[in-house]
Image (cartoon, helix red, strand yellow):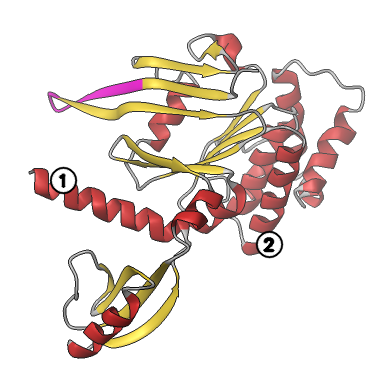
Amino acid sequence: MPNALEYKAVNKYFRSKGKLIQALHNINFSVAEGEVFGFVGPNGAGKSTTIKIMLDIIDDYTGDVQLYGVSARNADARKGIAYVPESPALYEQFTPLEILQMGLDMYGIRRTDKDAWCTQWLERFSIGHVAKQRIRSLSKGTAQRVALAHALVVNPKLLVLDEPLSGLDPVGRKDVIEILAEYKKQGGAIFFTSHVLHDVERIADRFGFIHKGELLTTRSPRELAAERADCYLVRYNAEQPIHSSNIQIRDSEFEIEVTQSELPNFIQQISANNGHLLTVKPAVSLETVFFKILNEQNNSNQISN
């Protein structure tokens, strides 16, 4: 059985102001059928470029991208694929019910219960009460739910989501996470980007960190927990950081990751530098890893330069 999505040695260059800039550097990863893969990175890291390549919006790249074993350059590869961008462009003059009905028509799906099927999905996203209101009258969060319902109403085998929880309130986020979990249980695969690292931890089976076009690492929450079982996150106040690897949270507030054996000595260093210990907590956190990798990458770049 082929993977739902596979990138093999993908490179992408852009030309800006006469200079050739490499946007993606030898990207390699795969997403298995029924797997949820989170793609994490700062703005400009290459997340959107990666999505545009798999959707054949960008086609001038080197390497190979396949969707269920078919080249992404082939239009047939996107049969059964649904995509929700970060800012969905829905026709404002239509209603949510009409949007979902159009989705079925565009995919060539014929159902005798079309209205009931579309209404069922709107109700599943808790927006059945606005089924016949114009999109222009809806809030951003409600429109986001319409876009997600539009993607799922066609029963896709792969969902590609760019910041799927953007604009949703806490209740909406919980609902969508539950719906995506159900979709996965039914065998669907998901590739999604997110700036909310806590959501990635809750949804993803594996996640990849991309920074300046380079995929720095891919791992699972289980691997993360195993790697960092002996690590602690220490936050403290001081005039200056005690160690160069400290991350500055705000003025005079810093954070560092230390092992259990290093912890007592570091607490003593805080006191010796007239600092104040704020919190100590286990470092099993995607956010901690994310900033640690960025910090290591930045330090490496400074040394090489």
Q: Indicate the quadrant where residue 48 lies.
A: top left
Q: Hey, what amino acid is under mark 2?
A: Val
Which residue shows up at 81% across the image and 35% down it? 118
Mostly what secondary structure, the magenta segment? Answer: strand
Decide: marks 2, 1 in contact (CB < 8 A)? no
Which residue shows up at 10% across the image and 48% down it? 303
Judge the density around disc 2: few (<14), some (14-19), many (≥20) Cα neighbours within 10 Å.
few
Residue corresponding to mark 2: 171
Whether residue 29 is visible here, answered yes or no, is yes
Q: Position of residue 136 (x, y in %)?
A: 62, 45
Q: Position of residue 51 (x, y in %)?
A: 46, 30
Above or below for 224 versus 66: below
Query: Going by the image, does 52 lie left or right of 108?
Result: left
- Count of residue discs: 2
Secondary structure of the residue carrying tag 1 is helix
Quadrant location of the C terminus? top left
Judge the density around disc 1: few (<14), some (14-19), many (≥20) Cα neighbours within 10 Å.
few
Which residue shows up at 14% across the image and 28% down it? 17
Which residue shows up at 67% across the image and 21% down it? 80
Query: Going by the image, does 55 lie left or right of 8?
Result: right
Reading the chain from its start, which is encountered first: label 2 or label 1?
2
Q: Hey, what amino acid is under mark 1?
A: Asn
